[in-house]
Amino acid sequence: MPYAIAAPAIATVPVLGGDPFPVHRIYCVGRNYAEHAREMGHDPDREPPFFFMKPADAVVPTGATVPYPPKTKDYQHEIELVVALAKGGRDVPVERALDLVYGYAVGLDMTRRDVQGEAKKLGRPWDMGKGFDQSAPCAPISPVSKVGHIGKGAIWLKVNGEIRQKGDINQLIWSVAETIAYLVNRGVPVMGHVGLRPQAVNVDGAFRAKGRTETERARVVAEAEAAADAGAFCVVVEGVAESLAVEITQAIDVPTIGIGASAGCDGQILVTDDMLGLFEWTPKFVRRYADLKGEIERAARAYADDVRARRFPAPAETYYAKARSHSSGK
């Protein structure tokens, strides 16, 4: 699809032993540690959680150098548990909320505290205090498939070898499951994804079609049903046998969209680059509707040649000033 300006790159976080995790939104839970809530002058005893957001491109990978931000004299850090969601939904009970988690990491919530404080006094949003560039450093994500779910465990922050913050996950006022349920039940639309998931191919073990054994088949169907039950508005079914795609489509009440999953789904995905023939390699499930790779390369070479030879732009493609008229003054 053409855009008016160049589309920004997708923000990602590294995954231990896997492909990068794409970041869509960053929701932050405010005052979810009792000690920090008291530090900020609030009663931590189970007041309803509240959220603020950071832009996806505020993410900074481990090891990066983060410059001191402008317009602040009070730049603060807070160590946080990061929960990466693989999907969302609606009306999700707390006991099912952890089914939505892809993995866990630790990160930093960087804050221009003086800017945030001024916004609070005026009753204005915190965006300038919380959502600035490079305000969300994040360590690599550990997938649930490798580490399980985290209900307790030490979390700490050192600055130049000195402990500045230390706590435990079990000190959260609102647990991970409670926080997820509270958030997704308030209108975050989510699309499910089952079968072959390229972003998890290193965790799954291979880039291959799913559902070829009864055990794997039952697991994929269960994942699709869980996504639909959690409130996903549709489910992408990728890289599965035709009979499994049909079974999933008949088993759930939301539309299925197939990619390498036969015509047994309600709709289809075909990546534009594959459709237009921009890659030499063509997967089994792809049909090319054009072969533009060679034509684009030819056009790019011709354009570069014309620019170097100053044949482009030509007089017909150039603007000129109009000649001025002069009067004698008589």
Image: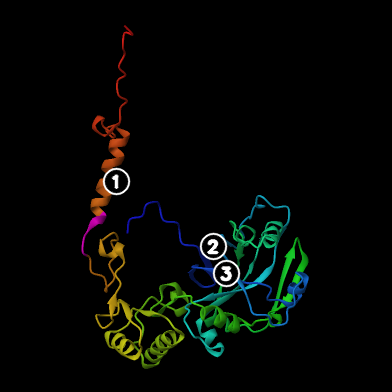
Where disc 2 sits, the SS reads loop
Badge 1 vs badge 3, beta-carbon distance below 8 Å: no
The x, y position of residue 312, in whole percent, is 28, 35
The magenta segment is 289-293
Q: Quadrant of residue 46?
A: bottom right
Amino acid under disc 2: Pro
Which is more toward the observer, 63 or 130? 130
Helix, strand, or loop for circle 3? loop
Kindly tell me whether residue 195 is visible in this rendering: no
Position of residue 96 in the picture relative to residue 46 (left or right): left
Q: Which residue is mark 1?
A: 300
Q: Is residue 204 in sight in this rendering?
A: yes
The residue carrying pointer 1 sits among few (fewer than 14), some (14 to 19) or many (20 or more) residues within 10 Å by Cα, namely few
What amino acid is at disc 1? Ala
Asked if residue 24 is positioned above or below residue 250 in the image, the reply reads above
Left or right of 149 on screen, residue 160: right
Image spot of residue 81 (x, y percent): 63, 74
The relative height of residue 12 versus residue 264 in the rendered view (above or below) is above
What residue appears at the point 54 percent right and 85 percent down from the top-left corner?
97
* Residue at the top extreme of this rendering: 330
Q: Which residue is mark 3?
A: 140
Residue, far front: 330
Task: Tell which circle, 1 or 3, labels the residue nearer the N-terminal end.
Answer: 3
Q: Between tags 3 and 2, which lies in front?
A: 2
Asked if residue 103 lies in the magenta stretch, the reply is no
Of pointers 3 and 2, the one earlier in the residue sequence: 2
Percent across and percent down for residue 299 are 25, 46
- What residue appears at the point 27 percent right and 67 percent down from the top-left corner? 282
Q: What secondary structure prevails in the magenta region?
A: loop
Q: Earlier in the sequence, mark 2 or mark 1?
A: 2
Q: Which residue is mark 2?
A: 55
Distance, label 1 to label 3, CA atoms, is 38 Å
